[in-house]
Image (cartoon, rainbow, N blue to C red):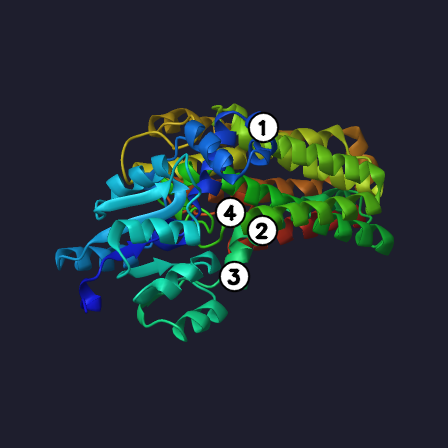
Amino acid sequence: MQDQNYVPLIVDLDGTLTLTDTLAESVVNVVKQNPLNIIRLPFWLLKGRLAFKQAIAARANLAVEHLPYREALIDYLAAERKRGRKIVLATAAHRSIAERVSAHVGLFDVVIATESDANLRGLAKLEKIRACVGKQFVYAGDSRHDLPIWLAAKAAILTGVSPRLAGLVRNKVPIEREFSNSSATLSLWSKALRAHQWLKNLLLFVPLLTAFSFFYVEKLASLAMCFVSMSLGASATYIGNDIWDLESDRRHPRKRQRPFASGALSLFKGVLCATTLLAVSLVLAFATSSAFGAMLVLYLIATTAYSLVLKTRVIVDVIMLSLLYTLRILAGSVAVNISISHWLLAFSVFAFLSLALVKRCAELMSLRTIYEGAMVGRDYRVADLEVLWPLGIGSSLAAVIVFGLFINAPETALRYATPSLLWFAAIGLISLFARLWITTVRGEMHDDPIVHLIEDRGSLLVILLMVATMMAAHCVRF
C-alpha cells in the first residue's frame, strides 16, 4: 500500500485554503461593480446554484491576490510539494476563480472545479477526485459537505472545523494535520461593530446639555434609547461598509486586519448580524418617536451614500462627515423636542469639518511613512497634505470664531448669567484643536478624532473643564 505521506493531497478552497468564501466575495464584487445587480441576484439564483455561480463568475473581477489565505496550510503544502507529493485543488468554486487562485498560490499540479456540467460539492466532488487521482488520497476540508470525501479518504486534514465535526471525522479517519481558526470572540465582534465608535453618538445629548435640561429624567431616558438605537444602526452600516470595502481594506496597511477583511469573521455572519442590528435599531427609534425614527432613517441613508459613493470624492467626503456629526445633534434635538440655535449648527459644521480633516490627514500621514502615493479607495494623495493642513486648522479656528460671536450675541445674555465666563471655554476649544492637530502632524493620531478626544485624558479633562465653565456661566452671576 502506498505510504500516506506520499499519496496525493486534495485541498478544498473556500474556508480551507482561504479564510473566506470566494462566491460570497464575488457576489459583493459584482454588486459593487453595478449596484443594480442586487436586483438580478434572486433571478440568477432561481435558475439553480450552478447557473448562479456561472452568472457571478462571468461578471466578477475578484482580486485573488488579496484574499486572506490560510498561511500555515500554504506553508505545509509547500513543504509537502517539495518532498514530491502531488497537490490538487478541488473546489466547488467556479473554475475561473479556482484557476486564478492556483496561479497565484503556485503549488497545485491539478485544478478540479465547478464548470458547466456540475456543481462540485460532496459526492460530485468525490467522483471527480477519484477520476483524477484514484482512491488513495488525503483530503483537506472545512465543512460538513466534505464529510463524504473525508470518509472515502486515506486520511484527513481538518481546517477550522467545528469540534463536533472534528470528533466525527476523527472516529472514522486518521488525521494527518489540523489547522484551527481564530475564535469569534466578543472582542472580535466588538471590533467588527466598532463599539468604540458609539462614543460619537453622545452628540445626541448636546441639545439637552446646551439647554441645561439634563435633570429631566424622561428626556434622559428617551435619549438613552436613542443612543442605543443609533449605535446599533451605525454598527450595521459599519459592517456593511467593511464588506463593501473588502478589497481596498486588504490593500491598506492597517485596515487589512479588520475582522471581515482578514477573514476572521465570515461575510454571511456579517450580513446576518447587520440585518438584525438594523431591524432592532429601527424598532427602538420609532418606539421613541416617529420624528427620531425619520432622523435615523435620514442618517442611515446619508451614511450609506457616503460609504457607497461620497467617500471617494475629495473634499466632498469630509464635508459629508461633518454633516453626519451635525445630524446626530439634530436627531437629539428632535428626540426631546428641544430647539437648537443657528450658532450651535454653524459651530458644529466648522468643528466637525476640522475633525474630519484630522482623520484624512492622519491616514495620509500613515501612508507618508510607507511611500509617496494615493490612498486606496479615497481620492487623496500624500501631496494633498499641503492643502488639507491649512483647511483643517482654518476650520477649527472658524469654529472658535463662531463660538466667540455666540458669546457676544444678545440671546446669549438671556440664557447665561455671566456670558463673559464662556471665553474660558473658547480658550479650551483652542487647546483641544491645537492638541488634535499637533498629534496628527506627529503621526500619532491612530483613531477617530472624536474617540481620541474622549479617550485622551488631557483632552477629556479640558472638555470637562469647559462643561463646568459653561455651567458656571449659566448659573453664577458676577
The nearer-to-camera label among 3 and 1 is: 1
Residue flagged by tag 2: what amino acid is it?
Val
Write down the residue under mark 4.
267
Q: Quadrant of residue 71?
A: bottom left
392 vs 419, left or right, is left
The nearer-to-camera label among 3 and 4 is: 4
Query: Is disc 1 surrounded by few (<14), some (14 to 19) or many (20+) residues within 10 Å?
Result: few
* Residue 151, percent from left and from top: 39, 65
Write down the residue under mark 1.
40
Q: Does label 3 or label 4 sit earlier along the sequence? A: 3
227 vs 424, left or right, is right
Spatial separation of the CA atoms under disc 2 and disc 3: 30 Å
SS type, badge 4: helix
Write down the residue under mark 3.
187
Spatial separation of the CA atoms under disc 4 and disc 2: 41 Å
Residue flagged by tag 4: what amino acid is it?
Leu
Q: Residue at x 60, y 41 (%)?
A: 237
Spatial separation of the CA atoms under disc 1 and disc 4: 20 Å
Residues marked 3 and 1 touching at CB (< 8 Å): no
Q: Does label 2 or label 3 sit earlier along the sequence? A: 3
Q: Front-most of 473 and 249?
A: 249
Write down the residue under mark 2.
462
Q: Front-most of 348 and 410?
A: 348
438 vs 319, left or right, is left
Spatial separation of the CA atoms under disc 3 and disc 4: 18 Å
The nearer-to-camera label among 4 and 2 is: 4
